[in-house]
Structures are given as structure tokens and as C-alpha cells.
């Protein structure tokens, strides 16, 4: 007998008439979840500006695009938003001023990325940080379509000599306002999208950071401090955890761009040793939150990748 999650996923994707009633039930659950979570176009105070302007290095221009997780939905102070945390942390790591421009939009889907890039035409960022995908899941955009749109945006940025770091879609199966069986559907869909995102963006020349654990054990075990008031978006502490896995990837991308060498800030013993296909790397990243996946430029074709696993404290 098929598992309930398999049936639910089939229904959400648009299965046959035999499960149309179950599909309607899922839609009803989705509507209730949206009412519980709430929807707003409010943005936090802008984080745009220069961080570490007293540091000696050349200013690094960072573009932040994507959805509410990139904006910092729910924050009431600019310095509590992910773009500001990124600016502060990256300035410290790189010992250089960091200019942040955030063009992410609450509720944005992957299809909105091109417009966000258009909004800074002529600014020429050194690196772009993208966090997107959650709204594609909740609006039932096919993962294949979302991944293809992401790859288009990454290729455009890379062609403009901009390094790209993407935080892949978090695992939505831990969101309490989403009830079962819809939560099982959201988990399966978000994991599938994250895997497809990784393959597409790495082949397009970007660097993937698995955020699957953003809503995993750490958030489940510390729900009271990791989630915001709506129990869907992260709290300030939750956003800080997200940024903590993005900063090393951004720094590595900038150094790789400058020196044409992957992960130069790590010692040889910490560098990835195994060469694997992009698909295998994406599968591994989906099971190990915080993992970076980057194209191996020495073997050509864009089909090979190296993996840098996040070292856990303790």
C-alpha cells in the first residue's frame, strides 16, 4: 500500500481523479495554514549601507536577493536582518568594508529574481547571495521549473563576473502551522526542490549551501528561540544561524574568484578530497545541512563538483 506522504505528494502535484478529493483537502489545509501564518508586505528597516567602513581593504559589493528569509521578515531593526548580519560578519572575515544592497521581497518566488537583479543594473556587485524557494513550494511551482529559473538567474550574474552563493530551500516539514498530511507534502517537495536547485545552480557556476537543517533538529529542539511570532519565519536567532553558514561560503567564493582556487581559506586537510558528480553532491548536501557544493573547474563540462562539509561544534 502506498505511504500517505507518497499519496499526498501525488495529490499536490496534480494526480488522477481518484484522489481529487484528497487534493481538495490539502488545498483547504494550505488555506488554513496561510491564515494562521499571516501575510504581509511589510519590510524591516533597510539594511543597505557600508559595514566596516573603517577597515583597510577595498569595498566588497554584495547583492542580496530572494524572499522573506533574505529580507529578514519580522525584524524591527536593520542590524537584526540577514543582509546586515552578512555585512557585519563578512567585513570581519574579509577585513574589508562591505556594501550591502538588499532587493529581496517578501513573498517572492524564483521567477522574481530577474526583476530583482534588474533593480541594481549598473551597480556591478562582486557577489550575490540568494535565498529563495519557500514560496515556490507553497504555491506549488514544479521543482523542475523553479530550478531552471534559478539557473537562469545564476548564469546571468556569473556572466557579469559576479560570484553567486545560494542558500537552498529549507526543509518545510518542521513548520507547526502546516498540519499533516500537508506537512509531509511540504517536506518532500522542499527537499526535492533543494536537490534540484543544487544541481542547476552549481552547473550554472554558483555555489550551493544546504539550508535543509535550518528548519531541522536545531529549530525543532529550540523552537521557542529559533522561530518568530508567526511560528513560520525565523527569529533573530534563527536568521543568525542561517547567516552563519552563508558567510563562509561567500568568503570562499570571493577568494576563489580572486585566486582561482577553491576553498583557499581552509587547510589542505580540510579541503574536499572526493570528486563526485553534481547530482551525487546535491544528494549528499540534502542530507547534511550547511554543506557547500561548488563546481570543480579543473575537469570541465560543469558535471563535477566538490563538497565542503560543515564541521559541527564539539
Image (cartoon, rainbow, N blue to C red):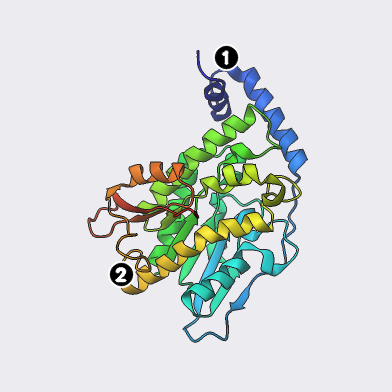
Cα distance in 3D space between marks 2 and 1: 55 Å
Mark 2, residue position: 260
Q: Residue at x 71, y 37 (%)?
A: 177
Left/right of residue 293 with respect to residue 212 in the rendered view:
left
The one of 274 and 204 positioned closer to us in this rendering: 274
Q: Where in the figure is residue 106, as x and y percent of width and height?
A: 67, 54
What is the residue that sits farthest to the front in this orientation? 314
Q: Residue at x 54, y 50 (%)?
A: 110
Q: Where in the figure is residue 70, as x and y percent of width and height?
A: 60, 58
Label 1 SS:
helix
**Label 2 neighbour load within 10 Å: few <14, some 14-19, many 20+:** few
Of badges 2 and 1, nearer the viewer stands 2
What is the residue that sits farthest to the left in this orientation? 299
Q: Where in the figure is residue 95, as x and y percent of width and height?
A: 49, 79
The one of 184 and 23 positioned closer to us in this rendering: 184
Mark 1, residue position: 18
The one of 260 and 223 positioned closer to us in this rendering: 223
For residue 118, above or below residue 11: below
**Which of the 4 image quadrants contains residue 88?**
bottom right
Amino acid at each position: 500500500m502506498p505511504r500517505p506522504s507518497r499519496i499526498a505528494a501525488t495529490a499536490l502535484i496534480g494526480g488522477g481523479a481518484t484522489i481529487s478529493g484528497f487534493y481538495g483537502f490539502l488545498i483547504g489545509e494550505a488555506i488554513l495554514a496561510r491564515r494562521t501564518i499571516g501575510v504581509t508586505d511589510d519590510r524591516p528597516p533597510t539594511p543597505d549601507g557600508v559595514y566596516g567602513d573603517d577597515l583597510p581593504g577595498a569595498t566588497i559589493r554584495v547583492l542580496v536577493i530572494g524572499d522573506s528569509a533574505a529580507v529578514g521578515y519580522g525584524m524591527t531593526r536593520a542590524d537584526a536582518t540577514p543582509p546586515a548580519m552578512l555585512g557585519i560578519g563578512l567585513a570581519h572575515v574579509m577585513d574589508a568594508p562591505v556594501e550591502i544592497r538588499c532587493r529581496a521581497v517578501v513573498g517572492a518566488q524564483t521567477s522574481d529574481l530577474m526583476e530583482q537583479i534588474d533593480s541594481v543594473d549598473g551597480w556591478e556587485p562582486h557577489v550575490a547571495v540568494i535565498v529563495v524557494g519557500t514560496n515556490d513550494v507553497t504555491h506549488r511551482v514544479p521543482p523542475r521549473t523553479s530550478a531552471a529559473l534559478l539557473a537562469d538567474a545564476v548564469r546571468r550574474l556569473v556572466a557579469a563576473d559576479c560570484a553567486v552563493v545560494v542558500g537552498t530551500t529549507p526543509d518545510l516539514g518542521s513548520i507547526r502551522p502546516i498540519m499533516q498530511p500537508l506537512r509531509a507534502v511540504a517536506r518532500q517537495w522542499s527537499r526535492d526542490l533543494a536537490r534540484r536547485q543544487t544541481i542547476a545552480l552549481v552547473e550554472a557556476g554558483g555555489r550551493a549551501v544546504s539550508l535543509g537543517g535550518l528548519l531541522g533538529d536545531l529549530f525543532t529542539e529550540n523552537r521557542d528561540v529559533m522561530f518568530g511570532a508567526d511560528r513560520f519565519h525565523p527569529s533573530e536567532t534563527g536568521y543568525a544561524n542561517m547567516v552563519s553558514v552563508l558567510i563562509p561560503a561567500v568568503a570562499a567564493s570571493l577568494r576563489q574568484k580572486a585566486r582561482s582556487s577553491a576553498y583557499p581559506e581552509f587547510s589542505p586537510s580540510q579541503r574536499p578530497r572526493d570528486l563526485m558528480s553534481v547530482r551525487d553532491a546535491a544528494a549528499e548536501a540534502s542530507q547534511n545541512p550547511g554543506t557547500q557544493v561548488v563546481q570543480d573547474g579543473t575537469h570541465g563540462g560543469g558535471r563535477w563538483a566538490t563538497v565542503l562539509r560543515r564541521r559541527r561544534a564539539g
